[in-house]
Image: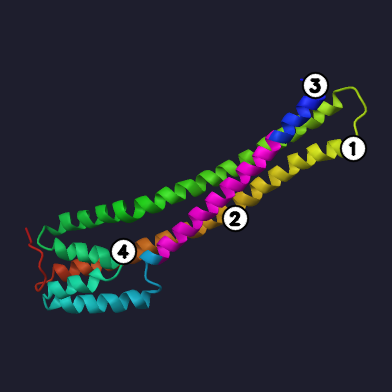
Amino acid sequence: MDLSNLSSVSQFAGDLCYLFLAAVALWGLYCVVVVWRRINQLRFRNDAEQTEFMVGLEAYLSSADFATAKQFCDGDDRVVPQLAGTAIEHKDIEPGKLRHLLADRYQRDVSADLEYRQSWINTVVKTAPMLGLFGTVLGMMSAFGKLGSGGKVEASALAEDISLALITTAIGLAIAIPLSLAVASINIRIRKLEDSVNVGLSRILDSLTSPSGGVVRR
């Protein structure tokens, strides 16, 4: 391959590298926004808000007013009220099976969706530096190809190839680093969500298995 062909191929591949870097950056940002909003939709804003909900629900459960308790949960899209509604619907089954049912429902409806989006974010975190490295290799190949041609090489021509090598690497890292921090923050929020769900479900199951509750003990 002659020098002109090598330079043109390197330039074309470099443009593709920029395009793919932009694409993975936008996709990673989109997934972060989706997961962040999804967690906000599923959780209570604070412990006081969840406690207020639980007090209201326990009042209905303690009086065995399950129809009103179910209506109280149905209008709320957050995960604890939704799981509470499921628990009330299946209040007559064995407590151990009920707990397993709720855990399965949480895994299927909440965890699976969040893990799917997180897996894409992690893929972007891994892919962006690799694309940057690919751009680095392309730029250095073109630069060394010009140096090895035996002719006089302009400094501006080498600078163009070296800039491709450095810029793509910098862009890849600039994508991966913020997304890595975002993943860490998302993991913390998911753990907080799981903790609040565990607390809420424990109170719900305690209310349902109390003497005025509706769970059949076997």
- Which residue is drawn at the image coordinates 71% and 37% (left, top)? 136
Tell me if mark 1 has few (under 14), some (14-19) or many (20+) residues whose alpha carbon lies within 10 angstroms of its own.
few
Q: Amino acid type of disc 1?
A: Ala
Rounded to the nearest angstrom, the CA distance separating label 1 from label 3 is 19 Å
Which of label 3 and label 2 is nearer to you?
A: 3
Front residue (pair 129, 17): 17
- Which residue is drawn at the image coordinates 37% and 67% (left, top)? 43
Q: Amino acid type of disc 4?
A: Val
Residue 189 drawn above or below residue 26: below
Look at the numbered disc 2 and give the secondary structure of its residue.
helix
Q: Position of residue 22 (x, y in %)?
A: 62, 47
Residue 106 drawn above or below residue 154: below
Q: Position of residue 147 (x, y in %)?
A: 86, 27
Magenta-highlighted residues: 13-40
Q: Amino acid type of disc 3?
A: Asp
Tell me if mark 4 has few (under 14), some (14-19) or many (20+) residues whose alpha carbon lies within 10 angstroms of its own.
many
Q: Residue furthest right?
A: 152
Q: Which residue is mark 2?
A: 178
Per the rendering, the mark at residue 79 is 4
Front residue (pair 27, 54): 27
Rounded to the nearest angstrom, the CA distance separating label 4 from label 1 is 61 Å
